[in-house]
Image: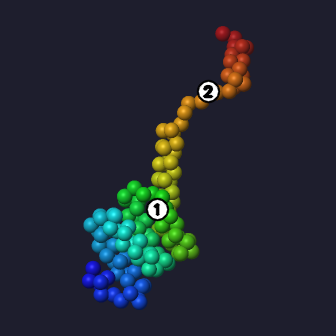
Amino acid sequence: NEAIEACPSDRPEDLATFYQNRSACYEKREMWDQVKEDCTFALKLNEKYVKAYLRRSRAAEKSGDLVLALEDVTSACILEHFQVQSSLVNADRILKALGRQHAREALAKRQPVMPSKHFIKTYFSAFLEDPI
């Protein structure tokens, strides 16, 4: 906190580092909303801060905001030129979790549909030549 207050406003990259460091402390204490908030401040000051994207992604995933988590880990992957395996694994894991979540929501809202008349007619016609 003292570093953030003492840092001059004409040094945005240093200030971004201080916010990111404080978010690391919040992450250890599992204070996910504060982690996201400080990482957001860091990213406003330095839009290419990969560590802030990754930390905010972890916090968003832990707090259940999978869309933000996927956006952030994807941003980190782009900035890393898709060269860091751990970021790619995280992106894949979050994408699969988000897909499962969307599938559950879609299945919960799904209305039953009767098969077409053609399908029913074809199905029952298969039994016409049944020897039994």
Task: Check the picture and name the quadrant holding the N terminus.
Answer: bottom left
Residue 17 horizontal side relative to residue 86, left or right: left
Colouring mode (rainbow / by chain / secondary structure / one colour): rainbow
Taking the spot 72% from the left edge, 18% from the top edge, the residue there is 125
Q: Amino acid at mark 1?
A: Leu
Say if residue 29 shows up in the picture. yes
Helix, strand or loop at label 1? It is helix
Q: Quadrant of the C terminus?
A: top right
State the image coordinates of residue 129 (x, y, percent, origin top left).
73, 14
Kindly indicate the quadrant of the structure image that contains residue 81.
bottom right
In this rendering, position of residue 87 left or right of residue 126: left
Taking the image as drawn, is residue 51 in sight? no
Q: Nearer the viewer, residue 83 or 120?
A: 120
Quadrant hosting residue 57: bottom left
Secondary structure of residue under mark 2: loop
Q: Determine the CA span between mark 2 and mark 1.
A: 38 Å
Residue that label 1 marks = 68
For the point 36% across and 89% down, the residue is 8
Residue with the mark numbered 2: 114
